[in-house]
Image (spheres, helix red, strand yellow):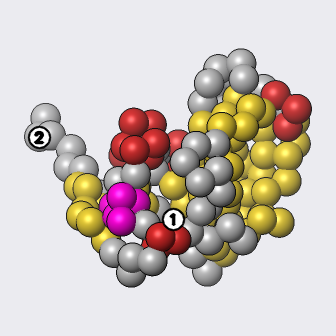
Amino acid sequence: MTEAYDAACHCGKVRFRVTLEGGLSQARRCTCSYCTMRGAVAVSAALDGITFLAGEEALTLYQFGTNTARHFFCASCGIYTHHQRRSNPSQFGVNLACLQGISPWDLPVIAVNDGINHPADGAPPRVAGILRYETSPT
């Protein structure tokens, strides 16, 4: 199932339309050092699944470690918008919180992939755990 969404960074300088592969059901977190610190929930898009409507020139690139993954964020507000995945370089991981009308809090369960023992380093893909969100009683 594919789903298309309008998306933007926090300040709105970077705006894009994204077609997700697998829709919101593929939402995930990761245990690698970078993903742990940024705390974003990512969903998947093909490399041709993002069309920039404005502000592509405002994106800044960050790479670390093997310099395979390419992490993009708005140079103005600092919000991570998307990254080209190390485990599957033919896909982007897109910050779910950038999708218009969608919040990570809308998803009660999110898989957490093992990014410490990374598949690109020879480890089998593995779900390290599950994050759950439950609203508190009013």
Q: What residue lies at 35% left-to-right and 53% top-to-bottom?
A: 31
Quadrant where the C terminus is found in the figure: top left
Name which quarter of the figure residue 71 lies in.
top right
Classify 70 as above or below 117: above
Which region shows up in magenta? 112-117
- Measured as percent of width and height from the top left, residue 74 is found at 70, 29
Q: Quick check: 85 above or below 9? A: below
User: Does 113 appear in magenta?
Assistant: yes
Q: Residues within 10 Å of mark 2 (few under 14, many from 20)?
A: few
**Outermost residue toward the left?**
137
- Which mark is on residue 24? 1
124 or 20, nearer to the observer: 124
Instruction: Please report the residue visible at 79 percent of the width from the left and 57 percent of the height from the top.
Output: 50
Q: Quadrant of residue 43?
A: bottom right
Does residue 131 show up?
yes
User: Residue 1 placed where, x, y %?
Assistant: 61, 80
Sequence order check, earlier mark of 1 and 2: 1
Q: Nearer the viewer, mark 1 or mark 2?
A: 1
Residue underneath mark 2: 137
Name the main secondary structure of what is drawn in magenta: loop
Along the line of sight, the residue nearer the viewer: 36 or 24: 36
Question: Alpha carbon of mark 1 to alpha carbon of mark 2: how far?
Answer: 26 Å
Q: Is residue 21 left or right of residue 129?
A: right
